Image (tube, rainbow, N blue to C red):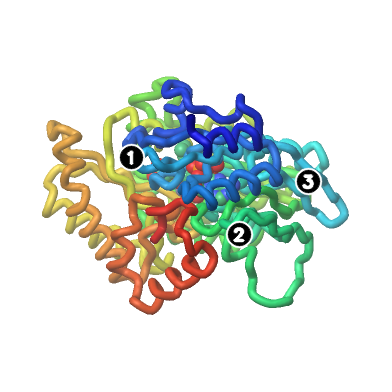
Amino acid sequence: MNNFLDLCRAAIGAPYVITNEADMVPYLTDWRRRFTGRAQAILRPGSAEEVAALVKLCSEARVPVVPQGGNTGLVLGSVPDDSGREVVLSLGRMNRIRAVDVINNTMTVDAGCILAQIQNAAAEAGRLFPLSLGAEGSCTIGGNLSTNAGGTGVLRYGNTRELCLGLEVVTPQGEIWNGLRGLRKDNTGYDLRDLFIGAEGTLGIITGAVIKLFPQPKAQLTALAAMQTTDNALALLTLAQQRCGATLTGFELMSQFCLELVAKHYPQMQLPFPQPYPQYVLLELSDSESEEHAMETLESLITSALEEDVIQDAVVAGSIAQSRALWDLREHITLAQADEGKNIKHDVSVPISRIRDFIRETDAALAEQFPGIRMVTFGHLGDGNLHYNVSPPVGVPADEFINRQHEVNQVVHDSVNSYNGSISAEHGLGALKREEVKQYKSDVEMRLMRTIKQALDPLQLMNPGKVL
Ligand code: FAD
Ligand code: 2HG
Ligand code: ZN
């Protein structure tokens, strides 16, 4: 008889305390299937009050807690370690849209709401919630907030942090902090909200949020441009920003090899150009005036870019289906690279002005040390954020290559550091990068972070072994 688990059952109902091994597996394995941990149980509370009751029980019994949303994180932050001592606290049942305020342009949501559900609810209210990423059909807003997710709309709307006005959080002691304020101005002390955003579940559990809504654009246009070099892509970015201003809502870079992988593993998706080019940019314009205005702006941009030899070819999607097809190419890169086999991911950012030199220098350093290494470089160029991923050379067994992950990371991250960049632009640190980050942050910065952790979670029970 396990007294702790019986108390959990009494708090939230026996069906919501999962201890059966087979039923626990999906919660214990990360999205990339790199690691399966162990846990005492999966706890599935239905309200903030139930989360608070469970966290109190965990605190009393000294049981470490791993918060989990959609479990789509890419840095081993949402799965437990292999000790078997931890519990996974899954927010999946907390999926209520609590309120929509169309005048204040805000929505109050449970943390377990799926991102796509929130986007749809905003659209039904005639508004836009602009956070958008490949995992939107299964990731939750609590996970988005806890990783401060980026995605494809950051250029115009910012990261998840910029899209949040208020939070409701269960503290490591099991109290509920109601900070669900829909205010755009509030300078009444330390910003606790911003402390919990991006904390990856190490400071408390987000149970609800007030998020920002925006007017829906009158028209949204997507285009794919083909070019020779990343220099051309950067020149196109400057031109597009000059011509389109805030209308430019997406600017995604993809190399030819990325799209070759997509075409290989998803043959139904083909490139719309008769010949391959080394680089491509997917552009999105969101126009508040009209479809005609959007088309004029986009066509004039493309004409100038062609005339100035910045790009070699371009297609503009003529329908929602064509636009979807272009986005599908972009969003299937992660899946296609996974289908190709095990790989090493780097989610890096450098100042946009230094991206060209970063790629040139780091590509050369990797090619010298790991001959034949296959670069899968793509990402949110408009934010200076590259997914500078690598696949093993053809013929080299994936496991042999993955064993050298540390050496590969050292080359890439040292280079990022020399460009004053970040080794995690949008995915977080989780358990995957927490050791490595220490090489690149000063002692002062690490000490400040540990001080905050110690002050809020002195028993070190909130997602231990992640971030710090
Ligand atoms: P989980 O994976 O469940 O958790 C992520 C972290 O947050 C963990 O540390 C967890 O403990 C913590 N956490 C979760 N919920 C809570 C909560 N309520 N309170 C406290 N802590 C919590 N990320 C980007 O930034 N941009 C992208 O473009 C992007 N694209 C992706 C595409 C694919 C195909 C995939 C698989 C992932 C992608 N991601 C991207 C990574 C991932 O971070 C996001 O999918 C998402 O933000 C994670 O949400 P989740 O609900 O799945 O969180
Ligand atoms: C994206 O931008 C995601 O598609 C995933 O952040 C990146 O697969 C990756 O490395
Ligand atoms: Zn990304």
Q: Label 3 vs label 1: CA separation? A: 44 Å
In this view of the protein, can residue 152 be seen by the observer?
no
Is 29 or 161 nearer to us in this picture? 29
Q: Residue 120's x, y, as percent?
A: 72, 36
Nearest to N terminus: mark 1 or mark 2: 1
User: Circle 1 is placed at which residue position?
Assistant: 82
Nearest to N terminus: mark 3 or mark 2: 3
Mark 3 crowd level (few <14, some 14–19, many ≥20, 10 Å Cα)? many
User: Circle 3 is placed at which residue position?
Assistant: 127
* Residue displayed at 85% across by 50% down: 102
Residue 227 placement, left or right of 13: left
Residue 146 placement, left or right of 358: right
Helix, strand or loop under label 2: helix
User: Circle 2 is placed at which residue position?
Assistant: 161
Is 289 or 332 nearer to us in this picture? 332
- Front: mark 3 or 2: 2
Q: How many marks?
A: 3
Q: Quadrant of residue 110?
A: top right
Q: Residue 416's x, y, as percent?
A: 31, 64
Helix, strand or loop under label 1: loop
